[in-house]
Amino acid sequence: MIGARIKELVHGFLDRNGKKREDIKGWILHPGGARLLGTVEQELGLCKCDTQPSWDILGETLATFPAPRSSLFFRSGWKSAP
């Protein structure tokens, strides 16, 4: 499961791009399920206020759609070079 490796994956991505966790302005988690969201929060030290939109989407779509595969997206304040 990705949750067990999420911290390693995120930190590796940030390191390769010369960024730190503090550079991340917001988090968007693919709502693969409550267990996944909770694990990602725990592993990355996020609070529910950081991930509330993901919880909202999970609650709205859980009954309509099957649980999607997990993915993690995050937004940073940096811009790529032209």
Image: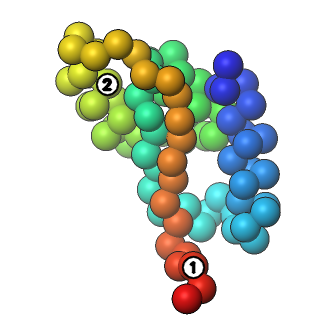
Q: How many marks?
A: 2
Left or right position of 74 against 48: right
Residue at the bottom extreme?
A: 82
Marking on residue 45: none
Query: x, y percentage for residue 40?
Result: 58, 32
- Height in image: 11 above or below 70? below
> Residue drawn at (23%, 11%), measured in percent from left and top?
63
Tell me if mark 1 has few (under 14), some (14-19) or many (20+) residues whose alpha carbon lies within 10 angstroms of its own. Answer: few
Name the mark nearer the viewer: 2 or 1: 1
The residue located at (66%, 26%) in the rendering is 2
Observer able to see residue 38: no
Q: Name the residue under label 2.
A: 58
The residue located at (63%, 40%) in the rendering is: 44
Q: Is mark 2 on a helix, strand or loop?
A: helix
Q: Which label number is shown at residue 80?
A: 1
Q: What residue type is labelled 1?
A: Ser
Name the image quarter holding residue 67: top left
Identify residue type, mark 2: Leu
Rendered position, 37 above or below 66: below
Q: Residue placed at 45% from the left, 56% from the top?
A: 26
Q: In this view, does 61 lie to the left or right of 66?
A: left
Instruction: Name the outermost residue toward the front.
Output: 82
- Secondary structure, mark 1, is loop
Q: Position of residue 8 (x, y in %)?
A: 78, 41
Is 82 or 45 nearer to us in this picture?
82
Q: Say above or below: 64 vs 37.
A: above
CA gap, disc 2 to disc 1? 31 Å
7 vs 80, nearest the viewer: 80
Quarter of the figure with residue 50: top left
Q: In x, y percent, where is residue 54?
A: 36, 35
